[in-house]
Amino acid sequence: MSEQRERYLEALGISVWRLRTASATTVQPAAEPAPVSAAASIAAGPLEVVAARLVTDVSASPATMGWDELAATVRVCTQCALHATRTQTVFGVGRRNADLLVIGEAPGADEDRQGEPFVGRAGQLLNSMLRAIGLPRSEVYIANILKCRPPGNRDPQPDEAKTCTPYLARQIALVNPRAILAVGRIAAQWLLQTDSPIGRLRGRVVPYGEAGTPLVITYHPAYLLRSPLAKATAWTDLCLVKDLLGKPQ
Ligand code: URA
């Protein structure tokens, strides 16, 4: 078994059995680097500018916005009913020119509280999965289909996803990643506009959007926490991403 595969399995909490030899050691996952907070990186100014512009220019479209204007627009968005129950919006986090864009479903309770995607237990596992292919969290960009938490963590409704999609579409265009990793059924089905089960969507590379960006689909880390046996399958998906990005073995 390769050292990297061992590291991956251990990071994901799967015991690795080894012959006892004098040299056998346990490989520990590397310490987690501090995440880059999108909220912290947004200057105070643009929010007021955008708020003023929204009053006078109702036709402002995310499709032409830069990062700061987009983030500020999302922060005050009231375009669907989810704004009434959120604590705050969850825009996205990470490197704005990342090679890899990770797309999840929607904020959960932890994300709604902290304003950052994937910060709960599923987020910790996502960090380990990314680290196993040589990508610390700070090196990728992470966003969700929805920027607001659906109450009780229910599935996003199609009209909510539709309303929120211009924001994600602009994030995809701005990051312009070399590859996209969609985690979970909801993100995969929405991006590909299909109702195929995730078991049929994962395990291959599909071109996404007009740019034909390579898209890989894998299981949601929250699912992997409930079904640890699927972690081995998810590893094969992550290897596709690693190969796309030319990461060494
Ligand atoms: N699950 C998601 O899909 N996104 C998050 O940000 C957190 C949990």
Image (cartoon, rainbow, N blue to C red):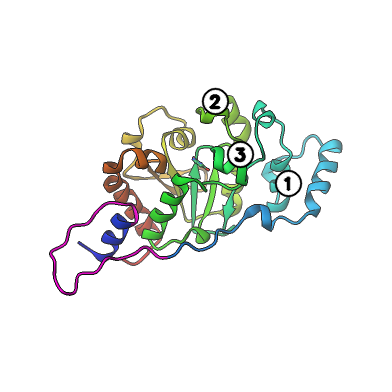
Q: Residue at x 67, y 40 (%)?
A: 88
Residue 166 falls inside the magenta stretch: no
C-alpha span from label 2 to label 3: 13 Å
Label 3 CB less than 8 angstroms from ligand 1: no
Q: Which residue is mark 2?
A: 157
- Magenta-highlighted residues: 11-30
- Image mark for residue 147: 3
**Quarter of the figure with residue 53:** top right
- Choose the circle earlier in sequence order: 2 or 3: 3
Q: Residue at x 69, y 47 (%)?
A: 71
- Image mark for residue 165: none
Q: Amino acid at mark 1?
A: Ala
Front in this rendered view, residue 27 or 53: 27
C-alpha span from label 1 to label 3: 12 Å
Local SS, label 2: loop
Q: Is residue 4 left or right of residue 125?
A: left
Report crowding for label 1: few under 14, some 14 to 19, many 20 or more residues within 10 A (C-alpha): many
Q: Which residue is mark 1?
A: 72
Report crowding for label 2: few under 14, some 14 to 19, many 20 or more residues within 10 A (C-alpha): few
Q: Amino acid at mark 3?
A: Lys
C-alpha span from label 2 to label 1: 24 Å
- Choose the circle earlier in sequence order: 2 or 1: 1
Q: Is residue 15 left or right of residue 127?
A: left
Report crowding for label 3: few under 14, some 14 to 19, many 20 or more residues within 10 A (C-alpha): many
Local SS, label 1: helix
Q: Amino acid at mark 2?
A: Gln
